[in-house]
Image (tube, grey):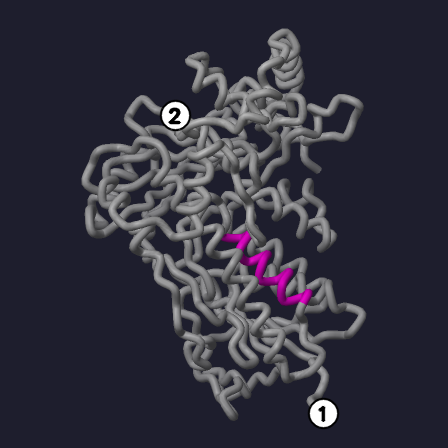
Amino acid sequence: MNAAVRSVAIVGGGTTAWLCATALKRAFLHRGLDVLVLDLGRSADDPLGRWTLPSLRSIHTLLGIKEGDLIRRTGATFRLGTEHRSWQGDASRFVQMHGELGIEINGAPFEKYLALRTLSGRPEDIEDYSLAAVAARTGKFARPTESQNALTSSFTYGLHLDDSAYCEYLREYAQRLGVRRVNSQLHDVLLKDGNVNALVLPNGERIHADYFLDCSGQQALVMNRVGGSDRQDWSAWLRNDRMVSTRAFAIDDPPAVTRTDATDIGWLWRIPLAHSSVAGYIYSSEFCNDNEAIRQLRQYAPCISEPMVCHLRQSRRTRPWTRNCIAIGSSAVELEPLVGADLHIVQLGIATLIELFPLDTHAAVEATEYNRIIGEHADALRDFTVAHYRTGAGRSADYWRAMQTEPLPPSLADKLDLYRANGHIVLRDHETFETADWAWLLLGRHCLPDALGLHVRAKLTDAAVSHLTKLRIAIEQLAGSMPRHMDYVRQQR
């Protein structure tokens, strides 16, 4: 009989490590699980800033973190979605909001009404039917609320985070819960029968545990010793292998959106924080060297720190849980931050581990299921990211043409083929992004189906235009009643 799991050691000092430590300690507080973090400090691939999906708020709620306190202490701001500029030419623009799009019409999804209007030569502005989009466009923000007016709960939101401030907040919170911290580097990893037996520190001290979480980022200091190094390489579809980022001056009265700007060799981004901003450039070294990327970034945003270059290896491990070691975050999955899913990937790893947490020190069955689930989640996030480059018309530069050469992943090809045939957006198991998210992307990039199914068209034929006019007016009025985004941020307590 194998011994019960009583201790977990986490290697890494960044946000991923402390989010894992907090979640595990909170989840198994009743069992007295010993959670220790070997704090290596920030690694070279830790970002300066992050933009998150709404799901991060769910884990904050489960952990007992008060959002107002988090925002006040870390300088975070709110995020209703992303505004993409120049992705289909210098004058182009589209948005992706977090939340519903319009209302059902006779039981038919609203995005199909918009598609039908465009196919009929009478296109409408998708943003006019989203409270989140209109609020973002006018620089307003308020949290969604449950009320008799369904529009007030028709959207959700993520956050813009200063990563070092967020990491410090989580570290303090975890330690108050009882997570132990050892501030040291890792000298060696001792194995016994293929499992991790102990972590060896430079002073010779050894850290023993039943399970080890590798949150050391791209270095994967523990997992690379255990094995499980087989990876699925995504670089044929996602060629960007560099990111340079910098701190920049604050944006004057910023809307609650992440902004990206496409160029001929990649895309720039900038996120607003309460007292500053963070900007970056995602690009391919095949088409641009680091010095040129830094030069363009300096032109894009007024830098107040030295730009930092890190490498991207867009891929995932096929076995992020190998023996008694589990890789979480970028130790397991590396994906460019376009869709804001880096911390969501961490959450998926944590949530799946808690659900499958082993009863004893032998967990081969749990590991197999964990690897399957995380693999499916990661592939779905990859597909949504790739779709940004492969739907609708794109820019004409060599970089963008190169992005179009490789056949699509079969899962994405099947999804897009079905959509083009009849407008149906199919969702499979373990997909993060829902129908509305895909609709924002596909319609925003002017990717339309060839036709709509007969039953859907019949439902939409009698759509009352006057009713939709009332909807637009109601959205404008609600957005107009919201405070300015930064005024709302300053009100957080």
Three-letter amino acid code at disc 1?
Answer: Met
Label 1 and label 2: CA atoms lie apart by 61 Å
Q: Quadrant of residue 249?
A: top left
Left of 489 or right of it: where is 246?
left
Q: Does residue 196 appear in this view? A: yes
Residue shown at 51% from the left, 21% from the top: 114
Is residue 109 part of the magenta span, yes or no?
no
Q: Does residue 295 appear in this view? A: no
Of 277 and 136, nearer the camera is 136
**Residue 67 in the image: x percent, y percent?**
68, 43
Location of mark 2 (residue): 93
Left of 174 or right of it: where is 349?
left
**Residue 443 in the image: x percent, y percent?**
45, 28
Location of mark 1 (residue): 1
Residue 81's disc number: none
**Residue 168 in the image: x percent, y percent?**
57, 56
Magenta residues span 342-355
Q: Secondary structure at mark 1?
A: loop
